[in-house]
Image (cartoon, helix red, strand yellow):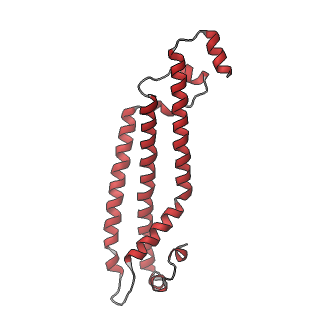
């Protein structure tokens, strides 16, 4: 896969044939992958929080019986405080990972020889392309989960609005049939 990312870069591919250089490349790719994964996670849970706030899933919780009777998912059973802590932890991990990438990028000079003509920018662009390609399915999965969270929050909101009107038992049974 890496060869495909380095179009026309024979010097670069020659440089990466060294075992140490290849190890460096793999480690750097792993670190960049980690940063991009954490960015996806942060975006997913940011959307989760936004949907919760828009549809008031935390401020007016439904009883477990209502959730079960209406076949709702319990996506919003996580408390707001827990979600804030989780998002802070993801942000902290992302900052650490970005710092590791920056430190690791500085090590490239230790791996280069005087006669080496490795273009750093070209290398980083190829690694980034490789990582984004590898995370494509995960990105699609996260987009699906964001839509799922939004629809789940809407359902929650609609059921909550319905029960706020204090329906009779017959009306509740009719709603459940629908």
Q: How many marks?
A: 0
Q: Residue at x 53, y 48 (%)?
A: 143
Q: Residue at x 45, y 82 (%)?
A: 12
Q: Residue at x 50, y 67 (%)?
A: 130
Q: Is residue 162 above or below residue 84?
A: above
In the image: residue 66, left or right of residue 127: right
Q: Is residue 151 above or below residue 16?
A: above
Q: What is the x, y in percent for residue 56?
A: 44, 28
Q: Residue at x 66, y 16 (%)?
A: 174
Q: Residue furthest right?
A: 177
Q: Is residue 52 above or below residue 65?
A: below
| Residue 24 visible to the viewer | no
Q: Quadrant of the N terminus?
A: bottom right
Q: Residue furthest bottom?
A: 115
Question: Splitting the image into 4 quarters, where does residue 100 fall?
Answer: bottom left
| Residue 14 visible to the viewer | yes
Q: What is the x, y in percent for residue 57?
A: 46, 28
Question: Splitting the image into 4 quarters, where does residue 97 fall?
Answer: bottom left
Residue closer to the observer: 112 or 44: 44
In the image: residue 79, left or right of residue 106: right
Q: What is the x, y in percent for residue 47?
A: 45, 42
Residue closer to the observer: 113 or 121: 121
Q: Quadrant of the C terminus?
A: top right
In the image: residue 1, left or right of residue 124: right
Residue closer to the observer: 9 or 17: 9
Question: Splitting the image into 4 quarters, where does residue 109 fall?
Answer: bottom left
Q: What is the x, y in percent for residue 74?
A: 53, 31
Q: Is residue 51 above or below residue 167?
A: below
């Amino acid at each position: 896969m890496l060869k495909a990312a380095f179009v026309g870069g024979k010097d670069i591919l020659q440089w990466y044939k060294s075992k140490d250089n290849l190890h460096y490349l793999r480690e750097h790719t792993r670190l960049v992958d980690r940063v991009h994964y954490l960015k996806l996670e942060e975006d997913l849970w940011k959307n989760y929080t936004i949907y919760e706030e828009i549809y008031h899933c935390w401020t007016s919780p439904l009883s477990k019986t209502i959730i079960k009777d209406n076949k709702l998912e319990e996506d919003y059973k996580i408390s707001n405080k827990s979600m804030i802590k989780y998002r802070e932890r993801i942000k902290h991990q992302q900052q650490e990972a970005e710092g590791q990438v920056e430190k690791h990028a500085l090590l490239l000079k230790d791996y280069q020889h005087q006669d080496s003509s490795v273009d750093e920018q070209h290398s980083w662009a190829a690694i980034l392309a490789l990582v984004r390609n590898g995370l494509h399915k995960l990105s699609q999965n996260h987009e699906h989960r964001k839509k799922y969270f939004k629809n789940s929050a809407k359902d929650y909101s609609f059921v909550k609005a319905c029960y706020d009107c204090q329906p009779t038992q017959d009306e509740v049974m009719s709603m459940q049939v629908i």
